[in-house]
Amino acid sequence: SKGVQGWMASATTPRVLTALSVAMLAVVWAVYIPAAAITREAYDSEPNVETRGGAAREAPPEKRPSVMDRKAAEAAFLQGNTIFQQGDIAGAVSKYREAVAKNPDHADAWTNLGNALSAALSHSDTEQDSLYRQGIKAYLQALRADPQHVEANFNLGVLHHSVDNLHLAIPAYEQAVKLDAAHVDALSNLGSARH
């Protein structure tokens, strides 16, 4: 994982947490949050998304989020961002799950849920497999909601790269670069994963 740039948002997507904010939080988490504080219960609850065969399916018109649900989802998403930036991973995961339960098409909330789960992965000795799988699922849900979401592709690559699954990281980085040829971190990580 040496040299991997992670959880980076481009200047055009400020709603997704940036590498700098996550890096700063990593220092806070390492110093102030013992690994035991990150428990399975904090991350295992699944958002209320209709699925068939593991893939999100489009809700019929009567089940699409109402305006009120979309507003509630946006509020929970923004609260999740604030909580995540304050270093409360479990609280952020909870808020992002609340956001995607209210609006399963909220790609940024799915992406930041993946980012929070990925951050938790680096601070857990016992729940790594579960957090890894949940992080993948969150990024894939973001891509179902918005297949052109550069940061979801990039961060999916970072997650795979962080556990040395380079054969899975490379296609995610390639897709991020295909969508944004100027994404420096995706280009850097792609080069790192290939060598």
Image (cartoon, grey):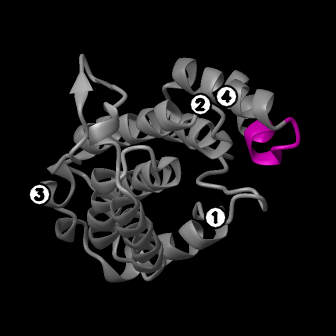
Question: Residue 92: image x %, image y %?
Answer: 35, 68
Real-space Cα separation, disc 2 to disc 1, in angstroms: 20 Å
Percent x, y of residue 184: 83, 46
**What label sits on residue 170 in the rendered view?**
none
Q: CA distance from mark 3 to mark 1?
A: 26 Å
Q: Position of residue 86 (x, y in %)?
A: 44, 83
Secondary element under disc 1, as helix, strand or loop, is loop
Q: Amino acid at mark 2?
A: Pro
Q: Which residue in the structure is indicated by mark 4?
A: 193
Question: Disc 4 marks which amino acid?
Answer: Ala
In the depicted structure, whether residue 92 falls above or below residue 5: below
Residue 184 lies in the magenta-colored region: yes
Image side of residue 192 versus residue 101, left or right: right
User: Which residues make up the magenta segment?
Assistant: 181-188
Give the CA distance from mark 2 to mark 3. 30 Å
Q: Tell which circle, 4 or 3, labels the residue nearer the N-terminal end.
A: 3
Q: Residue at x 24, y 27 (%)?
A: 51
Locate residue 17 relative to residue 55 in the image: left or right. right
- Residue that badge 3 annotates: 41
Residue with the mark numbered 2: 147
Q: Nearer the viewer, mark 1 or mark 4?
A: 1
Q: Secondary structure at mark 2?
A: loop
Q: Quadrant of residue 19?
A: bottom right
